[in-house]
Amino acid sequence: MMITSKSFFIQTISRIQYYGVSISGLFLLIITILSFIPVSQEPPMNNIDKIEHLIAYAALTIPISLAYHPRHKAIFWFACTWGMLIEIFQPYVGRQADTMDAIINAIGAGLGIIFAKYLFTLLCIAHAQSDE
């Protein structure tokens, strides 16, 4: 049972590494579209909106960080820049720019990269153990 779950984990992470750019590209497209859909009323100031931003940018950076493991800084700065640009341009589509959203986006991107590093380390350990 342990070998099956380890094998499944290795295969899953390997697929994410292989398709990482495509998966992150899809997330980037979804985030961008959802960020520019005009809303009739801004959401109430609550933490749900911030949690959504955190999760979205973490989900954006995890797959591409696994695919391009040593390029974490470039991935982080791209995600931060994209999040800031979205906030800058949102007023042009009837939405409100929020500096805190840009900050939470950066935190989410950072957490996604940290999580990807952790997964990558687990993958390396699992590969090393499977070779023994």
Image (cartoon, grey):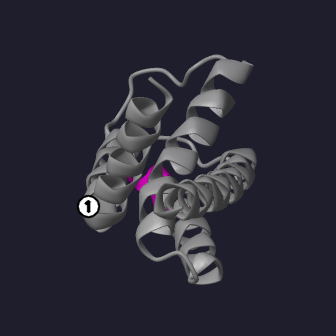
Q: Residue 76, image x and y in percent? A: 62, 71
Residue placed at 56% from the left, 83% from the top? 71
From the viewer's perspective, tell me whether residue 17 is left or right of residue 127: left
From the viewer's perspective, tell me whether residue 69 is left or right of residue 64: right
Residue placed at 41% from the left, 50% from the top? 10
Label 1 secondary element:
helix
Q: Which residues are magenta?
A: 88-93
Looking at the rendered image, the quarter that the C terminus falls into is: bottom right
Residue named by callout 1: 19
Residue placed at 48% from the left, 51% from the top? 91
Task: Determine whether 112 is above or below 35 in the image.
Answer: below
Amino acid on which the number 1 mark rests in the picture: Tyr
Looking at the rendered image, the quarter that the N terminus falls into is: top left
**Closer to the camera, 92 or 119?**
119
Task: Determine whether 66 is above or below 118 in the image.
Answer: below
**Closer to the camera, 70 or 85?**
70
